Each structure stands twice: as C-alpha cells, then as structure tokens.
Amino acid sequence: MDVKQAGSSLDSLISSFNTRISELQQFVIARNMYPASSVSDLSEIDSAVKGMEIQVQKIRDRLREETQAIPKAKKLIEAALGQQKRLKSMSACVPSCLPEIATGVIQDTSKRVQPGTPKRDLVTESLNHEEPAPREKKGRASPPMWYITSNELNALPSYMKQRLTLDKVNAAINDMATYAEANAQIIVAPRKKLAENMLDKALELREISMNDAVKGKHFFLETDIKGPALKLDNTGKATLTVLRHLGRISETRIGHHRVIILLKPQ
C-alpha cells in the first residue's frame, strides 16, 4: 500500500468516526429529555469517543513512521543492488579452479638424502628430534595474483588473444604465483635447509633478487615454467604476451636468465 492509498483509507476511517460521533450526539440530545437517567450513558459515550481518538492518533503515528522509513528502504535496496553487481563482476573474473600455492617447497628439498650420509643416522634423528618448519620472514607478502577480467580479455586484438580463454589465463597466473613463492622460499631458506642440488640455484636467485630491477618484487625465471597450466609452448608464449600487455608482468634479462616479474596492474 502506497502513501496515497494509506491516506485515503485514513480519511475513510475518520469520516466513519465522525458519522458515529454525530449519531451519538443525536442520542445525547434525545436522552437529555430524561436528565436523571442520562448521566451514566454520557460517561460511556465520552469514554468511547476518547478511545476512538487514541486509535486514530496511533494510526497517524504509524503511518508517519512508515512514510519516513521509505527513503531508508530505497537506499538499502540501491546498496544491495550495487553489491550484487560487484559480486557478479568478481565471480566472472575468478577462474573455475583456484589451486593453493605450495608452501612446503623448502621442507621437501631439505628431506632429500644427501650423498654420503649414513642411513642409520637419519632414522635416529627423525625418532629423537623433530625439526620445526622454517618460519617465514615477517613482512614478506604472498605473490600477487591479479586475475584478468572478461572485459580485459575481450578488449584485446584477436591476433594477440588467439584461442586463449579467461580460465586458461587466470590458471597461468596461479602457476606464476606458485613459481614466485617457491623462489622466495629458496631465497630466504638457511643453507643447511637446502639440498645439495639446490645450492647453486639458491645462490643465483639471491644474486638476481639484489638487482635493482627485481629488488623487493616477486619473480620467477623462464626455466621455472613447467606447468601445469603455463608451459613454454605457443599457448604459453601467447599467455605471457597477453599478461605483459595487461600489466600483470614485466620481463628483464639478468645474466643469462630471462626474469619475469609479477606486477600490480595500474
């Protein structure tokens, strides 16, 4: 019921009350012919009229409250619709599968048996002492995963987009974040936590991380690209081209390595 209909109903109710009061007044006039017996009747009539006036006032107050609540309800509906639109836009950008970034890279490499180590010593150590998992340095953020939107992908020229889909490109972003997280763990890991075959890579990565172009950023090497979604094939190269064009990555060459840096889109 809108305000006009409520007002019309209220007018009808007031008119009905006025008619009733008029009839009561006529009864009072008729009863005045016998004043001695009409006192109690007049008291009852007065009480009934006051009761009706209270009811009318309550109806008016309720109607005023509902009228004042209408603008607030409209604002709430607008906010809900805006939130719904944002959530739809977000859901369109999220890939169908979001694999978790592996955080146990260093632990796995540290468990490899190094050559020349007696097997009996390792078993005894594992029984008598459990090494705590290496702690991450405070303040080191996770690699950025800025997924692309369908609008960004559709705005690309067809020669660049080729047969890429939104899910394929965003799955590649997941892979790149995994590579960058693995490298970041290797860089901060103590030497004794690294297997022998990881030492050379750790030294290379630490040297690369000190370069001005890479310092303080998450990165991975072209040689790290090994799937599952991103591979060094034609599709993978097209994916890197798209992400570089959309400002998700940048590339530089340090020594003999092609270094790919993860960026926040501008």
Image (tube, rainbow, N blue to C red):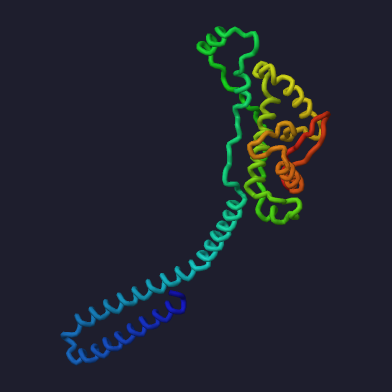
Q: Quadrant of residue 142?
A: top right
Instruction: Locate residue 185, reporting x and y percent.
Output: 66, 27
Task: Give me the residue at 61% from left, 25% from top.
Answer: 135
Is 129 placed above or below 90 here?
above
Question: Is 65 or 9 nearer to us in this picture?
Answer: 9
Residue at the extreme front of the image, as rendered = 234
Q: Which quadrant of the figure contains the N terminus?
A: bottom left
Q: Quadrant of residue 39?
A: bottom left
* Relative to 148, 53 lies left or right: left
Is 4 placed above or below 211 here?
below
Q: Quadrant of residue 35?
A: bottom left
Question: Is 109 or 161 nearer to us in this picture?
Answer: 161
Instruction: Locate residue 235, reporting x and y percent.
Output: 71, 44
Question: Is 207 or 31 nearer to us in this picture?
Answer: 207
Task: Give me the residue at 57% from left, 54% from top.
Answer: 87
Instruction: Locate residue 212, reporting x and y percent.
Output: 82, 33
Question: Is 192 or 165 nearer to us in this picture?
Answer: 165
Callout count: 0
Instruction: Locate residue 57, reporting x and y percent.
Output: 38, 74
Task: Give me the residue at 66% from left, 30% from top.
Answer: 182
Task: Give me the residue at 74% from left, 48% from top.
Answer: 246
Is 143 placed above or below 194 here?
below
Is 105 placed above or below 238 here?
above
